[in-house]
Image (cartoon, rainbow, N blue to C red):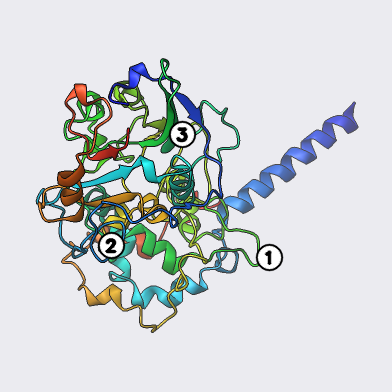
Amino acid sequence: MSQNRVDEYRRKLVMAAGGVAAGAAALASGFILREANAGGEAPTRPADQAVTNARRWGMLIDVTRLPDGGAAMVAACKQEHGWGDEGHSSDAQKAHWARVVKVTDKLTQNSFSLPVMCQHCEHPPCVDVCPTGASMRRADGIVQVNKHICIGCRYCMMACPYKARSFVHENLTDQRPYSPRGIGTVESCNMCVHRIDEGRLPACVEAAPDAVVFGDLNDPGSAISQALKAMGGKQIRADLNLNTGVRYHGI
Amino acid sequence: MTSKFLKVFLASALALAALLAGCGKAPAEADLNLATAKQKAAECVEPENVIRTRHMDFLMHQRDATVIEGIRTKQHSLKECINCHVAPAKQDGSPLHYGDKEHFCTTCHAAVGQKIDCFQCHADRPQVGQEPNYQHTIGSAEGHHFAQGVTAATMPTAAEAQMVAQPQPQGAAQ
């Protein structure tokens, strides 16, 4: 599987089945360099200080170590942010912050799955097109929607090459206190920004610590930089030159 | 014919009387369940008159600082307001939402006819399972309020203070 272009793949949306165990513990110890804390590190920043561009958060996902194709990561995201249970929306309308995409080589029928969410581009098309500035890239590289000024026009959904964004079509109640989401706004993976600001790892990284390395792409000594140096790591749609913060190994 | 007219007239008069009575009477404090809030007034993150007149400015400032710059101080955080002031359930045990008159924010906002949009997206009650210290009890160790220092907020103008001290009874009924 050398090709790197999503449009050569047959893509199929697999609705995440909850309760799939990560099951990665049995895998042999791999070549991902890792520091003491599994999954990477997110140093704590004082709550009263603004984020700076000294760090740029990213993650490297080793698809070969995800026997379920990332369904456990998607389930953890769903649980953390409470999306996907919109009662009045059709399946096509329901929120999908992350999804499992199955790709098959038409020639050889070789097939694998990978979790696809916001890729946290350095040059995000969704930010380019937003008419209000709601779609934004935080100084530390996290791409998110400022829902306070989002008008729900959905240009960013059209612009995103990864189909990472979704729109809330209905009134919601009992949202998570740390993850506000509501009718008329666009939403997507925000790399669990509330967790990162506390020095914790994103929920999906915690769900698959053996397959994902999270950390600072700007620091050459960080676990993720070392892992990327050792084994590379591909971007989806690298041809678009977006310099994504989410990288994959094994695709 | 006459009796029918009389009935309609009487019904209208009754309705008008009820309406007038409703207008003249502000919601009783017992109805609004303000005891907890009043008890906590002395421990609020800002002096009572300041928070009453300026809370929307604090929240507006804090929301941009949090979303854009990642500043997550607790003093003017909406989440902490909810944690401190709103009970997770009504007295009968059913979940308390911002549409209910017992909700701390709704008690005033319904009276002044001011719509709140915050809770279309934000949680309108504490999540007990995830936040064990959800309603900071008076004098508890949850000292983050004043520990960070009260900001040098501009004091309310005389007119605003007057408005808060002696709210206009007209239009107060729901």
Residue B40 location in percent, x, y? 41, 75
Residue type at numbered disc 1: Asp
What residue did someone put label 2 on? A198
Q: Which residue is located at x 78 percent, y 40 percent?
A: B11
Left-right relation of A242 to A22 = left
Q: Is there any visible trace of residue B116 in the rendered image? A: no
Q: Quadrant of the C terminus of chain A?
A: top left
User: Looking at the image, is mark 3 or mark 2 earlier in the sequence?
Assistant: 3
Circle 3 crowding by C-alpha within 10 Å: few under 14, some 14–19, many from 20? many
Image quarter of residue A155: top left
Image marks 1 and 2: residues in contact by CB distance under 8 Å: no
Q: Which residue is located at x 28 percent, y 66 percent?
A: B75
Residue B34 location in percent, x, y? 51, 69
Residue B57 location in percent, x, y? 26, 53
Image marks 3 and 1: residues in contact by CB distance under 8 Å: no
What is the number of the mark on residue B92? 1
Figure check: A9 above or below A18:
above
What residue did someone put label 3 on? A168
Circle 1 crowding by C-alpha within 10 Å: few under 14, some 14–19, many from 20? few
Residue type at numbered disc 3: Val
Residue B87 location in percent, x, y? 53, 66
